[in-house]
Structure formats: C-alpha cells, structure tokens
Amino acid sequence: MKIALMDSGIGLLPTAAAVRRLRPDADLVLSSDPDGMPWGPRTPQDVIERALAVARAAAVHRPDALIIACNTASVHALPALRAELEPALPVIGTVPAIKPAATGGGSVAIWATPATTGSPYQRALIRDFADSVAVTEVPCPGLADAVQHADEPAIDRAIAAAAALTPPDVRAVVLGCTHYELVGERIRAAVQQSGRAPVTLHGSAGAVAAQALRRIGAGTPPSAEPAGTLAVILSGRAAELPEAALAYEEGRLLKALSPVR
C-alpha cells in the first residue's frame, strides 16, 4: 500500500505521521512545493496550477490515495485535482475541524492564514457547523512560513500576535492550517489563561489520515511491521526530508521509522 501526501511545504508532516502510526507498513510519498511556498498569498488560479504540479509529481509514484494535507489547496484546488486524478487515484482533502470544536460547547477560535480567515469557504463551515457557539476568526500572518523554516523567533512572534487576537474565554482552538499542528502545544500555551479550563486544540491530521485509509478500504491491522518506505519530492525533485522538518517530532518520527527509497 502506498499513500501520497501533498502540501505547499512541511505542513504535510502531521498527517504523514498519523498515517505512519496507523499503518507503519504503508509506503509514503511526500510531495511539496518549497520553491512556491507559501501558497496562502497566491491567487486561487496560482494555487490550482501549483497544486496540480505537486500532485502530478506524486502521482508518478502510483500511490493508492492522495491526501491534500493543505487547507489552502483543499479550498482552491480540490475540484481540479479530483477532476484530473479521480477515479483512478482517490483524492482526500483537508477540512478545518470546526464541527468537532463547536460540538464541545463554549467559545471557539479558528487560527488560519490571512487568506483563509474570513473566506467564503471558512464562513460557510462556521455557518453550517458552529452557528450555535461564539466563533472568532484569528488571522496568523507569517506563522506558516515561520514554521516551514523552523524560525523559532518568528514562530514566537507570530503565535504571540495571534494569541493577542484570541478572546481569553476560548474553550477550543481550531488549527486551520496544517503547518500549525507542528507547533500546537506552543499555541495552546499561548492562549491558555490561568485559572481556566484547559484549552482544547482541534487539528485535522488524525481524521484525514483515517479517512484516507477508509477510502481505499485499508483498515488498521492488529500488528503491522514498520516496513513502509519514504519518498520525498520537493518542487518536482527527488530529495530527502528538509532539515527544518527534523526540528519537529513528526519529522523525526518519519525519518526514524521510514527507510528512504
């Protein structure tokens, strides 16, 4: 079994690690676009074109499924990707975990890129799944780029700026960009108020990984040998995991458990 994942950059790591935990025997193909990253400030047509190029590079490896581990690409390019690749290659998008966050009750903050914040797509998800709770959309300029480069001071600044826009009574934070899951605990610490109940983080990686496996009829076996290989494609070029990926637990997990093909 082979699962491909695509993103503008290393935001695909949390979902790839989730797939690896569920199916350590699965081969992984990680296709990203560091030459064109970030995608958030690009026009929708630019995102579609770059996403198609990244997806085609992954499809050469003949995976059983392709996960769009990127919120921006899922918003703008999912229909184009499905039109080109399905039904031969199932394509699974990433949706912010707004519904489960709202189900818990209490105030919700959605941290997302400036392009996604306030977008018709995100507003529709809020209307459909969170109309009964207070929701604050929090733009996080620069955070995805800082995470991509493991730029610690820039990460701290971007998280602090977004935390300042987050109401103190939030009970849940939706991580509306896959890059943010790599610094989830730092985000939680920044928004947690002394004396209040612990803030719950809602990412998408685990749910998307499980959905991809369900889509191709691949359950989680009782015991699967950790024999899956790893192929990395950076803007169409065969490569290794970027050095910045190893700054995060998910990147180190993939490197440790995956012989590079």
Image: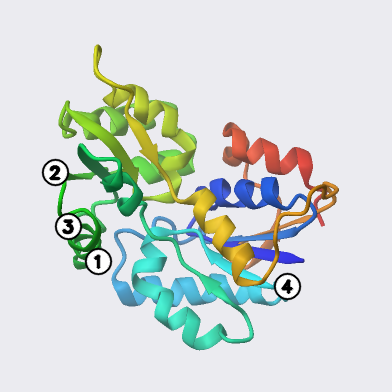
The correct choice, above or below, for 215 with respect to 149 in the image is below
Distance from disc 1 to disc 2, alpha carbons, whole Å, reads: 18 Å
Note whether 68 is above or below 137 in the view shown. Answer: below
Give the residue type at disc 3: Gly
Q: Amino acid at mark 1?
A: Tyr
Seen from the viewer's position, the closer of residues 45 and 192 is: 192
Which one is earlier in the sequence, the residue at label 4 or at label 2?
A: 4
Residue pointed to by mark 1: 121
Q: Earlier in the sequence, mark 4 or mark 1?
A: 4
Spatial CA span between label 4 and label 3: 36 Å
What mark, if any, has residue 134 been given in the picture? 2
N-term-proximal mark, 4 vs 3: 4
Three-letter residue code for mark 4? His
Location of the C terminus (image quadrant)? bottom right
Is 135 located above or below residue 212 in the figure? above
Report the Cα–Cα distance between label 4 and label 1: 31 Å
Give the residue displayed 22% in from the left and 41% down from the top: 108
Across and down, in percent, residue 17 comes to 63, 46
Q: Position of residue 69 (x, y in %)?
A: 50, 59
Marks 1 and 2, the one that precedes in the sequence: 1
Residue position marked by numbered label 3 in the rendering: 118
Q: Nearer the viewer, mark 4 or mark 1?
A: 1
Q: Residues within 10 Å of mark 2 (few under 14, many from 20)?
A: some
Write down the residue under mark 4.
61
* Amino acid on which disc 2 is placed: Ala
